Amino acid sequence: MLGYDGGLTSSQVRLVVEHSQKLKNVTMILTPPFQQGVFLRRYKRFFADITTASGTPLTIHCPNTGSMRGCLAEGSPCWYSFSNNPKRKLAATWEIATTPLGHLAGINTGRANALVGEAIRSGLMPQLAGWQELTPEVRYGEENSRADWCLQREGRRCFIEVKNVTLLEPEVSNRADCGHFPDAVSERGSKHLRELIRMVEQGERAMLVYCVQHSGINAVAPAIHIDPTYAKWCVRAKEAGVEFVALKAQLAAEEIRLTHSLPVLV
């Protein structure tokens, strides 16, 4: 069980690792399940107005600080969770959106970190076999950064940054199912790539993991049409030895499941 609960208490979220000959995955079981509503608008970055299944207006917390480009469709189905934390100003958190193209997009970025962390902890990422001492939020680099996760092996460290991918724009790619990151110009994203490059140059290991919470995305590429600087740093990072990994999440009201890896086109 991870400490991060995305707005729910630890008793309401259970992370289950399943093994079989055909499938190894991490499942975040949601108890109670997400509730369904209708999305109306997002505003001031952290707020969204919806109507519940009973037709009641409700303002909920938006846990995504990005532009959410390609995720907002007024009048579309959405899903949200409730927290029993009495200190929260907004009890409900937006979790899943329906995109203008009709796909589901998991917009809670914290869940991406939790899923990837449990995949690492449970040994479901073969790239990290033998690495131990998984630690979250580790300070590193020259630009005051925090790695989402850090591992160690025989005195060497592996720094891991996790990015949530929800942008699908088929018209800008040769692949109609290729998602892009970031969804807006991201100096922070470029900074993390520079930091990862420096770690490799210092003899450490570095990895960027894209958690794809989008039902229509089956590959990931840098969004050169949105942030050419970030795309440039992706190429430099790959050339320097930074590893790129993408993991697909399957979304439902009852559970979020990491199922398989996707190609990263850098």
Image (cartoon, helix red, strand yellow):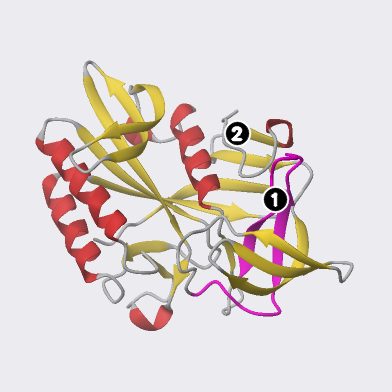
Residue 28: percent from the left, percent from the top? 63, 41
In depth, the one of 207 and 176 nearer the eye is 207
Location of mark 1 (residue): 89
Quarter in which the N terminus is drawn: top right
Q: Marks 2 and 1, Cα distance to the nearest angstrom?
A: 36 Å
Q: Left or right: 122 with respect to 244?
A: right
Picture coordinates of residue 165, whole percent (x, y):
44, 59
Quarter-of-image position of residue 225: bottom left
Magenta stretch holds residue 71: yes
Residue drawn at (52%, 39%) of the image: 114
- Residue beneath disc 2: 18
Question: Which is more foreground, mark 2 or mark 1?
Answer: 1
Does residue 61 appear anywhere in the picture?
yes
Give the vertical position of 100 relative to 126 (above or below). Answer: below
Q: Secondary structure at mark 2?
A: strand
Give above or below for 173 relative to 159. Answer: below
Chain part drawn in magenta: 70-98
